[in-house]
Image (cartoon, coloured by chain):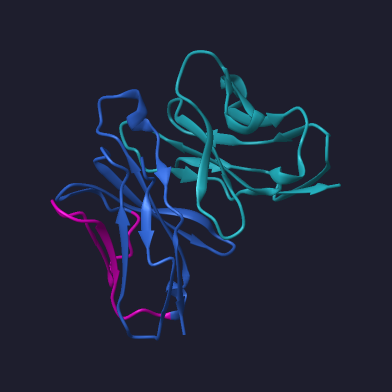
Chain colours: A cyan, B blue
Amino acid sequence: AQSVTQPDIHITVSEGASLELRCNYSYGATPYLFWYVQSPGQGLQLLLKYFSGDTLVQGIKGFEAEFKRSQSSFNLRKPSVHWSDAAEYFCAAHAGNNRKLIWGLGTSLAVNP
Amino acid sequence: NAGVMQNPRHLVRRRGQEARLRCSPMKGHSHVYWYRQLPEEGLKFMVYLQKENIIDESGMPKERFSAEFPKEGPSILRIQQVVRGDSAAYFCASSPPFGSRKSYEQYFGPGTRLTVT
């Protein structure tokens, strides 16, 4: 069955530190991959996506993600975290021919001053 | 260009009542998706539609839930005879017509938070 896994439920980092949020997928073929961010009580904002081509993709707010086919991973990174990055981060995927998104359970990010 | 609009933002219903959640897609978008976010369960796909057509409703509960996207007007997610377990945040997303690279992306509304008392 298709699935998306985010192994880390909660992560705390200090402001200015680097960040990596993990995401693994299980699909028959390489899916279309996405990272979304959700602030408390808010909707979901698309940070970045991977469809094909260059495996390092840049997104908004200084985020980037790297697709690694050999590891079935699509990890999200940021070199220097800001306090405003505290939020819930979701990895999601769809198969392309069927656009329903399958979601990871999310990683809650806390940022210490 | 306005984003995806959902209303109401908050909805309180007593057990047994009906809930109607509305979603207006972004201008030019032809597809609407509904997802439900339950505490401790994450986001789950429910249904996706284009105008006057349900494309995939594999995530919809078999009873009490229905969705439509009429030729005119917003998409409606309807929950009949609500129960406490229906309390959740319901998110709508939209995407452009298939055939463009952008059509693979979904843009989300702010959600409707349904509370069943």
Q: Is residue A77 visible?
A: yes
Q: Which residues are magenta?
A: B59-83
The image position of residue B57, as x and y in percent, is 28, 53
Number of marks in the image? 0
Question: In the displayed structure, would residue B37 be above or below residue A93?
Answer: below
Q: Is residue A96 visible?
A: no
Taking A59 as reference, is A108 left or right?
Answer: right
Report the front residue among A92 and B116: B116
- Residue plotted at (39% across, 45% down): B3
Q: Position of residue A30 (x, y in %)?
A: 46, 25
Q: Main secondary structure of the magenta part?
A: loop
x 43%, y 26%: residue: A29
* Relative vertical location of residue B16 with respect to residue B92 in this rendering, above or below: below
Give the position of the N terminus of chain B as an image quadrant: top left
> Which residue sits at x=47%, y=73%?
B87
Q: Can you give x and y, in whole percent of width and height, for residue A93 in the image?
A: 47, 37
> Where residue B13 sits in the image (x, y, percent)?
39, 81
Vertical comparison of A64 with A37: above or below? above
Q: Is residue A66 left or right of residue A86?
A: left
